[in-house]
Image (cartoon, rainbow, N blue to C red):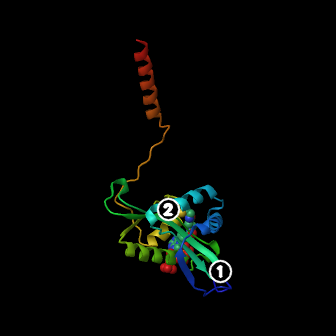
Amino acid sequence: MGTNPDEGVKTVVRRLTPADLERVIQLDAKVTGRRRDGYFEAKLKENMSRAGIQVSLAAETGPVFTGFLLAKVWYGEFGSTEPVAVLDTIGAHPDYRGRGVGTALFDQLRTNLRALGIQRIRTEVSWDAQALLSFFHHERFRPAPRICLEADVDDPVLVEREERRAMEAEEAGLS
Ligand SMILES: CC(C)(COP(=O)(O)OP(=O)(O)OC[C@H]1O[C@@H](n2cnc3c(N)ncnc32)[C@H](O)[C@@H]1OP(=O)(O)O)[C@@H](O)C(=O)NCCC(=O)NCCS
């Protein structure tokens, strides 16, 4: 810090627009090391079209696109009775880390959600992404009282059951 020419330049947060697609892809590539064109094309389309409520944000520090977050509002999905904002992705420019871009994005998100009467923000983080978990902890995220479940399509127990049923059906057809 201190040697950066735009040190002290204020970060401005605004709504993300479809025109930001390439900037988002480039910034994410700096963060993750690979371009995810398909993912962001689909996500931006989905997040921009959802019931007219757009809560995704962009951060600019002077002329530099320094951060973004992609979020959407869910109404009553997964058995929930209250609307919830779901955060898909967040990224801050590696050269601008630790300069308040992430918190500026979250402060604006909370302001916008309050105005919409939305009380909760939900996200999912890989258990291995310790840095990201620390940041979310700092932003007062806590484990939700929900259980995230997943199943392997090729689980041997289920594959065996499918095969058994297929065989039984075949035998029944033969007799
Ligand atoms: C997480 C991330 C958005 C934080 O952005 P940032 O602009 O550097 O964060 P800020 O400068 O606003 O920091 C906010 C606070 O969080 C803390 N923080 C940020 N990253 C942290 C970390 N890895 N561990 C602990 N604390 C952290 C900062 O110390 C700061 O605290 P302070 O306000 O008390 O000083 C950014 O590091 C990032 O883009 N990480 C990669 C995210 C990623 O993997 N995205 C792809 C999958 S979703």
Q: Residues within 10 Å of mark 1 (few under 14, many from 20)?
A: few
Pick the residue in front: 19 or 133: 19
x and y percent of residue 26 in the render?
66, 66
The correct choice, above or below, for 91 with respect to 7 in the image is above
> Circle 2 is placed at which residue position?
49
Pick the residue in front: 84 or 92: 84
> Circle 1 is placed at which residue position?
63
Quadrant in the picture for residue 51: bottom left
x and y percent of residue 136 in the render?
46, 69
Residue at position x 35%, y 56% from top? Answer: 146
Label located before the other in sequence (2 or 1):
2
x and y percent of residue 17 in the render?
56, 69
The correct choice, above or below, for 53 with respect to 107 in the image is above
Q: Quick check: 111 left or right of 11?
A: left
Residue sitting at the far left: 81
Instruction: Determine if residue 100 is in view.
Output: no
Residue at position x 45%, y 44% from top? Answer: 151
x and y percent of residue 50 in the render?
46, 61
Identify which amino acid the numbered label 1 is placed on: Pro
Instruction: Determine if residue 2 is in view.
Output: yes
